[in-house]
Image: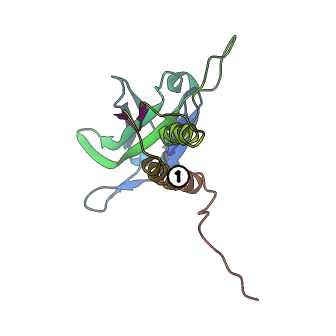
Amino acid sequence: MNIPASIRAGSTVKWRESSQVDPFGDALQSTDSWAMKFYLRTNTASEGHTATGSTYGTGWQVEISASDSSAFDAGDWFWNCEVSKGSEKYIVGSGALEVLQALAYTGTPGALQGKSQTEQDLDAIQSAIRTLVSGGVVKEYSIAGRSLKKYDLSDLMALESRLKYQLKREQKAELIANGLGNPAAMYVRFN
């Protein structure tokens, strides 16, 4: 399926899907009166959206308008793709996508938290480490959903290391998802 892995709320989103096949290997094509719908839902609110494909060759072109996506809450969304004709319905794909917060504003812009939860946790850990190293006392912190009265420096450094690793994995996955390649891949050319 060609639905984007992430979209920005308030933007027009378009993609194309090719013809599909039923469980018996028969073609499901828009030219044969098959309809395609994407059902999108989020687990953060009772909201959803249905995007209906229009005929494009033997497949479909699907669009979510900017006005529709502007109402999307930022976060994880889940989708299901259905191809139907009359009483026949086939689920041909499902998955998840990320809705990014809209950056457009009118008047004076409000505060924006553009960092992921991992980045926010890493910042809190590094702040706690700086406090301990400079002779301060870390009395109580809430990091990664855990509240503790006191952290040892070794515990903070171990948690920092895990968060840095997790952040690198997230950044690598984002590069790959955006078509920018795997930063860990090495290419060799022989002449």
Residue 155 location, x and y as percent? 42, 49
Predominant secondary structure, magenta span:
strand
Frontmost residue, 51 versus 158: 158
14 versus 185 height, above or below: above
Q: Amino acid at mark 1?
A: Lys
The residue positioned farthest toward the left in the image shown: 87
Magenta segment: does it hold 146?
yes
Residue 2 location, x and y as percent? 49, 50
Tell me where residue 106 sits by quadrant.
top right
Q: Residue at x 36, y 27 (%)?
A: 44
The residue positioned farthest toward the front in the image shown: 135
Frontmost residue, 85 versus 121: 121
Q: Residue at x 62, y 63 (%)?
A: 183
Asked whether the viewer can see residue 136, the reply is yes
Magenta segment: does it hold 75?
no
Left or right: 11 as drawn, with respect to 23? right
Frontmost residue, 7 versus 162: 162
The residue positioned farthest toward the right in the image shown: 191
Residue 38 location, x and y as percent? 39, 38
The residue positioned farthest toward the bottom in the image shown: 191
Q: Residue at x 49, y 49 (%)?
A: 160
Give the residue pinned by disc 1: 164
From which residue to which does the magenta span run?
141-148
53 versus 105 height, above or below: below
Residue 54 location, x and y as percent? 48, 38
